[in-house]
Image: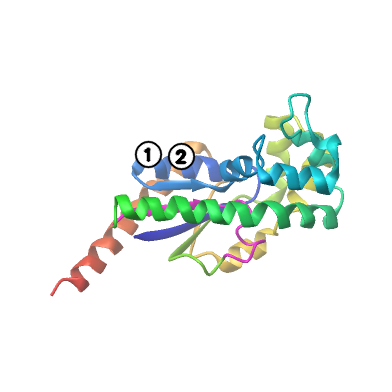
Amino acid sequence: MQRIGLTGGIAAGKSVAARRLAELGAVVIDSDVLAREAVAPGSAGLDAVVDEFGRGVLAGDGSLDRAALASIVFADDAARARLDGIVHPIVRRLSAEREAASATTDHGAVVVHDIPLLVETGQADAFHVLVVVHTPAVLRVERLVRLRGMDRAEAEARVSAQASDDERLAVADVVLDGAGSDDDLRTQVDDLWDRLAVERADELAAETP
């Protein structure tokens, strides 16, 4: 089994790369999806978040009000660290369970862990290959304003709350350029997939007596 770490700053294009990898046959484990599962209604994770931040982070239907929680944690590094301390251990457990299930089904699976905060959570050395989708921070802010309707101050806060471009690039094994079009990024992913296939073939040949 090949374990790939995939990361990139908010609005860098990481989701485009992850979707293309899934289309090509990778098993993509999306940490954002698992983070939502970790605080789903009725979960121990949601109970812990409410205990920490109060019932004001709940929507009327009892689910997590993400906007209310974001307004707290993105303005306060200590609050964000407390939230991470609740959610990240649950996400890692769920991720390990998904990976184990994939390995059981296909010993030769390519498992891609799509982790926005991979660098921030100290997981840079946990994968065979670490792929970073890189788009300069200034362009990511523009995308958040133009495509997601954020005001500029909020967009800049979201970007600055994550690792810097230099921090991600320093640990990357492979850098994909996300500054261009989605089609261009998908082409880069296709090229990466081909390289990974060659590496898998070489490893199998080396293991064959």
For disc 1, the neighbor class at 10 Å (few under 14, some 14 to 19, many from 20) is few
Q: Quadrant of residue 155?
A: top right
Counting the numbered discs, the total is: 2
The answer to whether 34 is drawn above or below residue 209 in the figure is above
Q: State the residue at coordinates (45%, 46%).
A: 28
CB under 8 Å between discs 2 and 1: yes
* Numbered disc 2: secondary structure: helix
The answer to whether 209 is drawn above or below residue 101 in the figure is below
**Disc marking residue 123:** none
**27 or 41, which is in the foreground?**
41
Specify the amino acid type for callout 2.
Arg
Q: Is residue 201 left or right of residue 110?
A: left
Separation of residues labelled 2 and 1 (CA atoms): 6 Å
- Residue 112, percent across and down? 45, 52
Q: Is residue 176 left or right of residue 168?
A: left
**Disc marking residue 19:** 2
Q: Is residue 43 left or right of residue 202?
A: right
- Residue 140, percent across and down? 68, 44
**166 or 53, which is in the foreground?**
53
Q: State the residue at coordinates (23%, 62%).
A: 201
* Numbered disc 1: secondary structure: helix
- Residue 120, percent across and down? 67, 61
**Disc marking residue 23:** 1
The answer to whether 149 is drawn above or below residue 39 in the figure is above
Residue 83 in the magenta stretch? The answer is no
The magenta span reads 108-123
Q: Main secondary structure of the magenta part?
A: loop
